[in-house]
Image (cartoon, grey):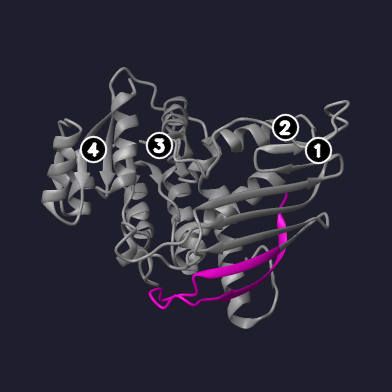
């Protein structure tokens, strides 16, 4: 089923994991003229039936993932299960010839990363890894300004994910606070910041140095980590990921260029905006917003569907995601050893 699938029939979609993210995926797949959700997989049949009824789906429900792949002749699998299950499910779906939309992270262990990429390549299927903020309006606004040379060449950048999570208050805390389930601060959530840094810098990192700490003992791993990156051209970057901060959620972007600076939705670029005397704020939806476009799944999933239909690679395929994950695993190694780690790791 790899390659272009230009056809009059709707593409058959299977959803793995009936949680909140899956619900957002289902909405888009059901609204698209190209796709229909025909199968749901989950730990319990009750949760799948609940999702089926909630969205009025004509879909079969499964508690056996391999059975779903064998019986449903799927074109697409959307993986929204807990993090540590992604690798096995992605490999099995690729081997079954299914195009893959994988919620981040792809894997929680470095040894699983390249087998997933190889399986997708061997099958010739399309892939998209769910760094959904690429479709956030603030991200798109910043990228547009950078592409137009508004702040010149970036020589330094800071992207931070700061989100205090707590048991009893945050859905899914019971599994993503664990090493097996969530993996780490970066894998559980801060990967959005690592991806964002790469998205804005458009340069390849060659070295990472990181330190981690933790005061909240509900986490099995250090919930706070800071990492510094050095890029091939000498520019630098910083990511701070913390899941134990006592503050409202904050996703912060600061980009420093030879002709100006971007700070979230504010820009100072006097050569681009002649006569500018102070920061200019651009009203937009930021990642900190409660607006639904903070998590713009419609743009992400529709991009994936269009790429599958047209037989072209997505903007966030497995190979791009591998580079983000390599930085994450290198940062975690650096935090363990106290030494810098060179990139790429292979």
Question: Considering the numbered disc 2 on the image, is that residue within a helix, a strand or a loop?
Answer: helix
Percent position of residue 70, x then y? 20, 46
Residue 105 figure quarter: bottom left
Please report the bounds of the magenta region as a residue range: 202-228
- The residue that label 3 is drawn on is 2
Where residue 140 appears, x then y in whole percent?
A: 61, 33
Q: Quadrant of the rendered structure where residue 44 is?
A: bottom left
Task: Specify whether residue 227 is painted magenta.
Answer: yes
Asked whether the residues under the numbered discs 1 and 4 touch, taking CB atoms below 8 Å apart as contact, a structural biologist would say: no
Q: Which residue is mark 1?
A: 151
Instruction: Name the one closer to the observer, 61 or 272.
Output: 272
Residue bearing the label numbered 4: 73
In this picture, is 7 found above or below 278?
above
Going from the N terminus, do you reach mark 4 or mark 2 first?
4
Q: Is residue 58 left or right of residue 119?
A: left
Q: Indicate the position of residue 138 as horizontal and vertical percent values.
A: 59, 36
Mark 2 or 3, nearer chain start: 3
Quadrant (top left, top right, bottom left, bottom right) of the N terminus: top left
Q: Disc 1 vs disc 2: Cβ atoms closer than 8 Å? A: yes
Residues marked 4 and 2 touching at CB (< 8 Å)? no
Q: Which of disc 3 and disc 4 is earlier in sequence? A: 3
């Amino acid at each position: 089923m790899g390659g272009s699938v230009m056809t009059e029939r709707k593409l058959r979609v299977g959803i793995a994991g009936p949680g909140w993210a899956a619900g957002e995926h289902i909405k888009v797949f059901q609204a698209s003229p190209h796709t229909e959700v025909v199968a749901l997989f989950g730990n319990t049949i009750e949760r799948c039936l609940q999702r089926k009824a909630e969205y009025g789906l004509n879909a079969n429900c499964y508690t056996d993932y391999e059975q779903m792949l064998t019986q449903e002749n799927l074109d697409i699998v959307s993986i929204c299960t807990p993090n540590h299950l992604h690798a096995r499910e992605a490999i099995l779906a690729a081997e079954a010839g299914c195009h893959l939309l994988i919620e981040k992270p792809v894997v929680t262990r470095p040894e699983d990363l390249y087998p997933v990429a190889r399986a997708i390549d061997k099958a010739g299927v399309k892939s998209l890894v769910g760094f959904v903020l690429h479709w956030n309006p603030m991200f798109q606004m910043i990228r547009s300004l950078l592409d137009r040379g508004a702040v010149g060449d970036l020589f330094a950048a800071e992207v931070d994910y700061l989100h205090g999570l707590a048991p009893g208050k945050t859905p899914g805390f019971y599994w993503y606070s664990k090493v097996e389930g969530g993996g780490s601060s970066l894998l559980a959530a801060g990967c959005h910041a690592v991806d964002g840094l790469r998205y804005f810098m458009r340069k390849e990192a060659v070295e990472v140095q990181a330190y981690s700490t933790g005061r909240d003992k509900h986490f099995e791993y250090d919930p706070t980590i800071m990492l510094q990156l050095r890029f091939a051209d000498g520019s630098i970057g910083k990511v701070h990921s913390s899941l134990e901060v006592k503050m409202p959620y904050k996703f912060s972007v600061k980009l420093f260029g030879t002709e100006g600076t971007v700070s979230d939705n504010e820009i100072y670029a006097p050569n681009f905006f002649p006569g500018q005397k102070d920061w200019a704020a651009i009203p937009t939806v930021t990642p900190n917003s409660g607006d639904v476009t903070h998590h713009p799944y419609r743009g992400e999933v529709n991009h994936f569907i269009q790429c599958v239909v047209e037989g072209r690679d997505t903007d966030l395929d497995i190979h791009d995601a591998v580079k983000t994950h390599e930085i994450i695993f290198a940062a975690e190694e650096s935090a363990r050893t106290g030494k810098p780690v060179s990139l790429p790791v292979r």
